[in-house]
Image (tube, rainbow, N blue to C red):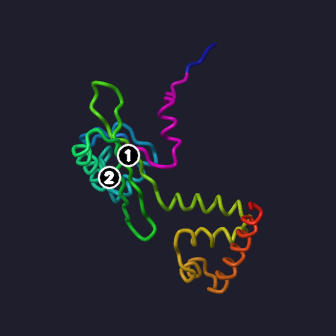
Amino acid sequence: METTSCVKRPSLLQAVLEGFIDGILILTNQGEWLHANDCARRICHQLSKGISQPDRVPKEIWNTCERLIESLNRYPHQTLTVEDEINTGQTTSYRIRAQLLNLEQGHSPCFLVTLEDRLQSIQNAAIAEARHYGLTPREIEVWLYYRANYSYKDISSRKFISYNTVKKHMKNIYAKRQMVLNTLE
């Protein structure tokens, strides 16, 4: 006996878009959502300050799209990407990139908007570096804060360790880093 599944499988394109670390929004030229991956929905929700606005583009993102529209009107035969950065607090920063997306002839052009969570990108890079340098778990914690632009003083207060301990961890990290860099030469 053959059973059929009631679970709808995502399309290949949808699966690819969901796999991106960055948020991906595809918008009409009126700002309506055609697609948003989970990361983009999360970022839009954060920018909307928790106010439920399903399928609404936060004004910070739409402002970037409007700048793209203005640029396209001035330079209609150019391939343009407009970038902007949104800072919502000490640790939250997003990079927005908007570009024109022509899907099919006869259809209105759309916008492809990528939303990069800068802190997440820094953390991913720091974790990769930590593995590459062979850092201890405590050194990894210190390195993550350091790469996110925290001062030694801030790191010491957040990790409940002394300033000198932070300096000692950073000295060890730099030594391990230099050892790896020397082997690459």
Q: Is residue 111 magenta?
A: no
The residue under label 1 is which amino acid type?
A: Val
Helix, strand or loop for disc 1: strand
Q: CA distance from mark 2 to mark 1?
A: 8 Å
Q: x and y percent of residue 176 in the render?
A: 74, 70
Q: x and y percent of residue 82 in the render?
A: 34, 51
Q: x and y percent of residue 104 in the render?
A: 34, 26
Quadrant (top left, top right, bottom left, bottom right) of the C terminus = bottom right
Q: Earlier in the sequence, mark 2 or mark 1?
A: 2
Q: Which residue is mark 1?
A: 113
* Residue at image location 52% in from the left, 48% down from the top: 21
Residue 37, quarter of picture: top left
The residue under label 2 is which amino acid type?
A: Ile
Residue 125, quarter of picture: bottom right
Left or right of residue 135: residue 50:
left
Q: Is residue 17 magenta?
A: yes
Q: Which residue is mark 2?
A: 61
Residue 184, quarter of picture: bottom right
- Quick check: 160 above or below 121? below
Say few, some or many: other residues with alpha carbon within 10 Å of mark 2 (under 14 / 14 to 19 / 20 or more).
many
* Residue at image location 28% in from the left, 28% down from the top: 107
Q: Which residues are magenta?
A: 5-25
